[in-house]
Amino acid sequence: MALNDDSFIREVNEELRSEQVRTAWRRYGRFVVAAAVLIVVGTAVHRGYDYWQTLEASKSGDQFLAALKLSQDKKPDEALAALAVLEKEGHGSYPLLARMRTATLQAEKGDTAAAIAGFSAIGKDTGVIAPIRDAARMRAAWLLIETGTYAQVSAEVEEMAVPQNAQRHSAREALGLSAYKAGDVTRAKEWFKQIVDDPESPRNVANRAQMLLDIIAASGKTS
């Protein structure tokens, strides 16, 4: 009898569960279907967008290569025009590459002021990753050694001339050269000595710094 009771109870429980499922499906089934449709549509849209982005980035890559070819063919104005379009309409990383290349071409053409402005703007753009910003600021600083003041060079790179910064060696060299050009021998010696004393300074940078320290010492200048 107990076995029959157990079987009966199991059957009742199963029937109740089935009825609960049917009731829940009647009540919420349309929401489940809608959610499933949204998932499928969302996945399709996401994959379609990824494909479109890849396709557009590929087109931008072709445009960038075409601009480089114009530059190599000694057609800087045409190259700059192509890069300007890519900067505004390109996809992926190509607008940033176009900005960097534009500033480089401007420097090669002798339009140093425009090149400095371009590199400096990239260096201040928080939407750009830090290593690229630092590289752009460094390019601006090296152009400023010839055409700007020590203060301008310092504004670009002095915060990079600190221990643990990967760009510190180039930053210190730029600062030292700018100070030396400005006639500030004391400050120049400080920067060059930091390079020489840093065991991680690249050999060529350290050698140049030591050479300039020797020149300063031989000249007898102290300030």
Image (tube, rainbow, N blue to C red):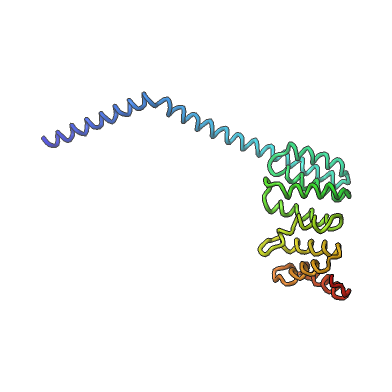
Q: Residue at x 76, y 55 (%)?
A: 155
Q: In front: 49, or 192?
A: 192
Q: In front: 97, or 55?
A: 97
Q: Residue at x 82, y 45 (%)?
A: 69
The total number of labels drawn is 0
Q: Residue at x 77, y 58 (%)?
A: 154
Which quarter of the figure has residue 25?
A: top left
Q: Position of residue 24 (x, y in %)?
A: 35, 27
Q: Tell me: residue 4, above or below residue 127.
A: above
Q: Position of residue 143 (x, y in %)?
A: 83, 55
Q: Tell me: residue 203, above or below residue 60.
A: below
* Quarter the N terminus occupies: top left
* Residue positioned most to the left: 1
* Residue positioned most to the front: 223
Which quarter of the figure has residue 62?
A: top right
Q: Position of residue 6 (x, y in %)?
A: 17, 35
* Quarter the C terminus occupies: bottom right
- Looking at the image, residue 162 sits to the left or right of residue 148; the answer is left
Q: In front: 7, or 154?
A: 154
Q: Position of residue 153 (x, y in %)?
A: 79, 57
Q: Residue at x 78, y 64 (%)?
A: 173
Q: Tell me: residue 179, above or below residue 116.
A: below
Q: In front: 40, or 91?
A: 91
Which quarter of the figure has residue 131?
A: bottom right
Q: Tell me: residue 58, above or below residue 107.
A: above
